[in-house]
Image: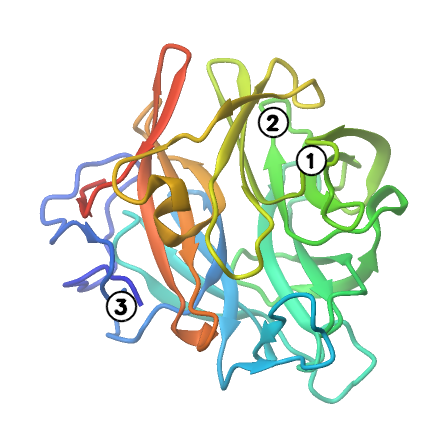
């Protein structure tokens, strides 16, 4: 795994305060450990900031990696689904393991959350109207033919989340996905649809539990996945990857004037060593750092397809300079 080194106790600083002893910087390519010294296990991350605390939700991958041999058009590698993990931090550096926010349902083979299924790409939003935390995630069969979005709800960001079931948003496939909450409180699910040929942006209901039917198709026929959306200076920026299985490819950033608008590609935002391969990683989330206006973090996974539990993380600054957007490679980076 890649690494956050030298993690000690969870910081008690208020949101936006300076860290007096931040420890060493992010070091891409080393192990990331939680405050108890254990490897952080939270892949395809979603990040939620709530009441002074960041909550990192991700795929909890445990056990051997196997290949679904009846699939021969791509390397369908998987581990048995264990659930969705949650870590908490006040400074984005010292992470405390909060347990499984959404656990697998080992006793029910028909459940979307059974270990034989696929549980990926969790993202969580807080709904100000209902006071609930709402998780959307990609649920699938082991051959990825189910292609649905699962929904779960909790009174706490750490869970336990109660699974509400799954659906195909607006009648379309949903694989790699993310959530986005706009300034007006409206929420959107962005997913790979049409057998991964096109990205859909689906407006969600006021309780965030279902689509309203209002949507936008983007990257039509361009085969994009791993979407991540952020708003900056009134515009919407969408990062995604190509579809090449577990192998890295070139990222793309697109911009629109409206969240359900027409997105125009700005090209590959990555710069520096291995930028054409997205630093051998894949996008998962874009985060604005609380208390630091216009300071953003781009979160990636570096997949180890032969041992998915050992897949690691790459976190880099996302920079806006006029109309130019960049994600520069840095071996070490200090938030």
**Tag 3 residue:** 33
Q: Nearer the viewer, mark 2 or mark 3?
A: 3
Mark 1 and 2 residues: CB-CB less than 8 Å, in contact? yes
Q: Is residue 178 left or right of residue 260?
A: left
Q: In the image shown, does 312 or 179 lie closer to the viewer?
A: 312
Mark 1 and mark 2: Cα distance apart in space: 8 Å
Mark 3 and 1 residues: CB-CB less than 8 Å, in contact? no
Examine the rendered structure and indicate whether residue 78 appears above or below residue 216. Answer: below
Examine the rendered structure and indicate whether residue 276 appears above or below residue 247. Answer: above
Q: Is residue 70 left or right of residue 308?
A: right
**Tag 2 residue:** 182
Examine the rendered structure and indicate whether residue 314 appears above or below residue 239. Answer: below
Residue that appears at 53% across and 66% down: 59
* Image location (x, y in percent) of residue 265: 56, 23
Residue that appears at 74% across and 72% down: 143
Query: Badge 3 local density, few (<14 within 10 Å), some, or many (20+)?
Result: many
Quadrant including the N terminus: bottom left
Mark 2 and mark 3: Cα distance apart in space: 32 Å
* Image location (x, y in percent) of residue 154: 64, 58
Query: Badge 2 local density, few (<14 within 10 Å), some, or many (20+)?
Result: few
Residue that appears at 75% across and 51% down: 174
Which type of secondary structure does the marked residue at label 2 adopt?
Answer: loop
The residue at the far front in this view is 73
* Image location (x, y in percent) of residue 253: 50, 29
Which color scheme is applied?
rainbow
* Image location (x, y in percent) of residue 80: 60, 81
Question: What is the number of the mark on residue 188?
Answer: 1
**Sequence-first tag of 1 and 2:** 2
Which type of secondary structure does the marked residue at label 1 adopt?
Answer: strand
Query: Badge 1 local density, few (<14 within 10 Å), some, or many (20+)?
Result: many
């Amino acid at each position: 795994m890649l690494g956050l080194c030298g993690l000690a106790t969870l910081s008690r600083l208020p949101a936006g305060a300076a860290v007096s002893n931040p420890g060493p910087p992010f070091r891409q390519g080393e192990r990331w450990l939680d405050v108890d010294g254990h490897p952080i296990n939270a892949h395809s991350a979603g990040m939620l900031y709530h009441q002074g605390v960041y909550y990192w939700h991700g795929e909890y991958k445990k056990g051997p990696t196997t290949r679904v041999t009846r699939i021969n058009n791509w390397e369908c590698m998987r581990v048995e689904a264990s659930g969705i993990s949650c870590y908490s931090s006040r400074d984005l550096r010292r992470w405390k393991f909060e347990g499984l926010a959404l656990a697998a349902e080992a006793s029910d083979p028909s459940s979307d959350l059974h270990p034989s299924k696929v549980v990926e790409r969790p993202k969580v939003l807080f709904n100000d109207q209902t006071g609930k935390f709402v998780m959307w995630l990609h649920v699938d069969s082991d051959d990825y033919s189910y292609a649905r979005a699962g929904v779960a709800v909790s009174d706490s960001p750490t869970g336990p989340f109660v699974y509400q079931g799954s659906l195909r948003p607006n009648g379309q496939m949903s694989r790699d996905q993310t959530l986005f909450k706009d300034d007006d409180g409206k929420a959107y699910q962005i997913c790979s649809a049409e057998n991964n040929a096109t990205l859909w942006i689906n407006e969600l209901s006021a309780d965030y539990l279902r689509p309203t039917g209002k949507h936008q198709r983007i990257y039509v026929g361009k085969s994009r996945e791993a979407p991540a959306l952020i708003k900056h200076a009134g515009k919407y920026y969408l990062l995604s990857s190509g579809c090449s299985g577990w192998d890295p490819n070139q990222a793309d950033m697109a911009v629109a004037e409206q969240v359900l608008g027409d997105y125009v590609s700005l090209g590959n935002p990555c710069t520096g060593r291995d930028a054409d391969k997205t630093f051998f990683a894949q996008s998962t989330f874009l985060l604005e750092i609380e208390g630091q206006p216009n300071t953003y973090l781009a979160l990636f996974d570096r997949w180890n397809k032969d041992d998915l539990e050992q897949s690691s993380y790459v976190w880099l600054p996302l920079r806006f300079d006029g109309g130019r957007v960049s994600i520069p490679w840095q071996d070490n980076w200090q938030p």
